[in-house]
Amino acid sequence: MIHSIDPSLKAIRDKVEAGERLTLEDGVAMYDPRVPLNDLGVLANYVREKINGNAGYYNINTHLNATNVCVYRCVFCAFRSDLRSPKGYVMSDEQILERGREAVENGCTEMHIVGGLHHQKKFDWYKNILQVLHDAYPALHLKGWTAVEINWFEFLTKQSTEWVFRELLEAGLGSLPGGGAEIFHPQVRDKICEHKADGSNWINIHRTAHQMGIKSNCTMLYGHVEEPFHRIDHLIRLRELQDETGGFQTFIPLAFHPDNTGLSHIPKPSSAMDLRTMAISRLMLDNIPHIKAYWIMLGIGTAQTALSYGADDIDGTVRHELIYHDAGATTPELLSVERIEHLIREAGREPIERDTLYRKVHRDPANPAAWTVGEAVEAAV
Ligand code: V47
């Protein structure tokens, strides 16, 4: 029972306690700055503890962005490059394998693989990245290619989504990251990334992934040109797909970082907005098991606080992150396991290492780079 709450949240509190679904109007109302942030946090924390108890999940992971050369010019992106720009790069198989070796030596269970859509590279180049890594390091989970990239592969090959996924699974794909979602509503999408896969393409690709047994994540990029209505509309579209398939594991709200982008005049969202969005996401997405506070993007302090504002996961130790660091993120390049566990404990949560598919990871203290997975963690959605 949640006793003392601001009058503006009483009707929402009653629904949350009764396990009733919140509406579009409820979601938009919670973005009114007169609704006290702390009280919103209390409600989100109630749901978070009901679903995930006291767990604070993390994993040991690394990123691979094999090229930054991209046909698209999303106005919010600081990572992309033109082919002839001095910033543009393409990694060789040797460099990619070296990243795999470094990941395994450091005990990583996951490699998060995304990048630009290089107009001179064929589908086989992308598929080969998974193949060489999987052949050399079969235990490393390859969470690769956003729905936008899958859509590009369909364009390149003139084949169906199912065909593309079958090829990628054969090469070693483990699951799909949640990027490329941005904001689905065309009023916003047409302003920030008009050329790439639209909202229904994104949703249909994740639906197909789920139907083929591929788990995925989902995201929302907030704090640029969108309004609260567009954010809630976005969350409801994700919730509807989850009702249908149950294939989403975690939702990651992504705060816009303006440096070096076409929207550099827009200030970065405040911590208060980050926490409000985290709490509203937990409350609206009643059927998605995990909400991730991506520390790279939020900063360490806000990510810790978010563990009491709806989030139960802090992402991973992370290595070689470029997308946020190119856009002005001042967070470190990586965190050690000791530090990440300390930060989670300091926030009052119990650190639990998970793999990409949310199974508990067991390590041999004598050889921490060696690991096995155990049972799936519980999440009461
Ligand atoms: O799709 C790009 C966003 C996403 C900027 O699945 C930006 O576990 C802020 O999706 N400011 C990629 N955001 C990152 C992503 C992700 C991250 C962590 C975990 C997972 C997961 C997925 O980053 C892009 C876009 O929405 N992005 N540029 C920027 N300037």
Image (cartoon, rainbow, N blue to C red):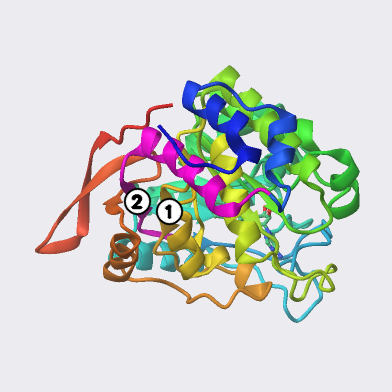
Label ID, residue 56: 2
Confirm whether residue 253 shows in the render: no
> Circle 1 sits on which residue?
307
* Above or below 1: residue 35: below
Kind of residue at disc 2: Gly
Whether the residue under disc 1 has CB within 8 Å of ligand 1: no
| Disc 2 to disc 1: CB gap under 8 Å | yes
Quarter of the rendering occupied by the N terminus: top left
What is the span of residues highlighted in magenta in the rendered image? 35-62
Residue placed at 44% from the left, 66% from the top?
Answer: 99
Confirm whether residue 301 shows in the render: yes
The image position of residue 351, as x and y in percent, is 28, 54
Which one is earlier in the sequence, the residue at label 2 or at label 1? 2
- Secondary structure at badge 2 equals strand
Residue extending farthest top: 244
* Nearer-the-camera pick, 134 or 235: 235
210 left or right of 308? right
369 left or right of 49? left
Structural distance between the alpha carbons of marks 2 and 1:
7 Å
* Above or below 127: residue 245: above
* Above or below 111: residue 40: above
The image position of residue 315, as x and y in percent, is 44, 55
The image position of residue 61, as x and y in percent, is 40, 58
- Examine the structure image and report whether residue 249 is included in the region drawn in magenta: no
Whether the residue under disc 2 has CB within 8 Å of ligand 1: no
Kind of residue at disc 1: Leu
Between disc 2 and disc 1, the foreground one is 1
* Nearer-the-camera pick, 238 or 87: 238
The image position of residue 36, as x and y in percent, is 61, 51
Quarter of the rendering occupied by the C terminus: top left
